[in-house]
């Protein structure tokens, strides 16, 4: 089974990568962009026996920095 984990910075946390993307888009002539927040997408291929609790533990222990990041887990049906 495929699992998608989306990781994003918490509101209020400075996002230098997002600012750089915002600046670059404006430099390319795109207007109307009010804010950009960059994040990560991690895809895992896991056995059906892997539980939601195990996926949550993976995020808390390794994949996300809980001090500054939020995450969401989505199982993708085949």
Image: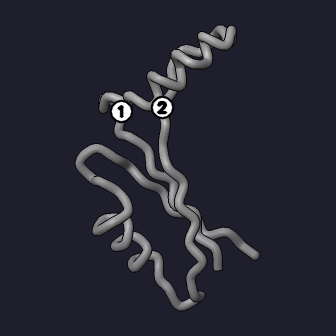
Q: How is the image coloured?
A: one colour
Picture layout, residue 68 above or below residue 50: above
In which image quadrant can residue 26 be found? top right
Q: Secondary structure at mark 2?
A: loop
Q: Residue at x 44, y 31 (%)?
A: 17
Q: Position of residue 66 (x, y in %)?
A: 28, 53
Asked whether 19 or 7 is in front, the reply is: 19
Asked whether 44 or 53 is in front, the reply is: 44
N-term mark: 1 or 2? 1
Q: Secondary structure at mark 1?
A: loop
In which image quadrant can residue 76 be found? bottom right
Q: Residue at x 64, y 80 (%)?
A: 1
Q: Position of residue 37 (x, y in %)?
A: 48, 31
> Mark 1 or 2, which is nearer the eye?
2
How many numbered discs, if any?
2
Q: Position of residue 11 (x, y in %)?
A: 36, 32
Horizontal side of residue 35 vs 60, given as left or right: right
Report which residue position mark 2 lands on.
Answer: 37
Q: Position of residue 5 (x, y in %)?
A: 51, 60
Task: Please tell me how crowded label 1 is: few (under 14), some (14-19), or many (20+) other residues with Cα within 10 Å.
Answer: few
Q: Residue at x 72, y 73 (%)?
A: 77
Asked whether 72 or 29 is in front, the reply is: 29
Report which residue position mark 1 lands on.
Answer: 11
């Amino acid at each position: 089974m495929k699992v998608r984990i989306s990781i994003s910075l918490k509101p209020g946390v400075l996002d230098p990568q997002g600012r750089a993307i915002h600046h670059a888009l404006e430099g390319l002539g795109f207007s109307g962009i009010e804010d950009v927040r960059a994040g990560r997408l991690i895809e895992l291929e896991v056995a059906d026996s892997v539980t939601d609790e195990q996926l949550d533990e993976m995020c808390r222990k390794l994949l996300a920095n809980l001090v500054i990041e939020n995450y969401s887990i989505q199982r993708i049906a085949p």
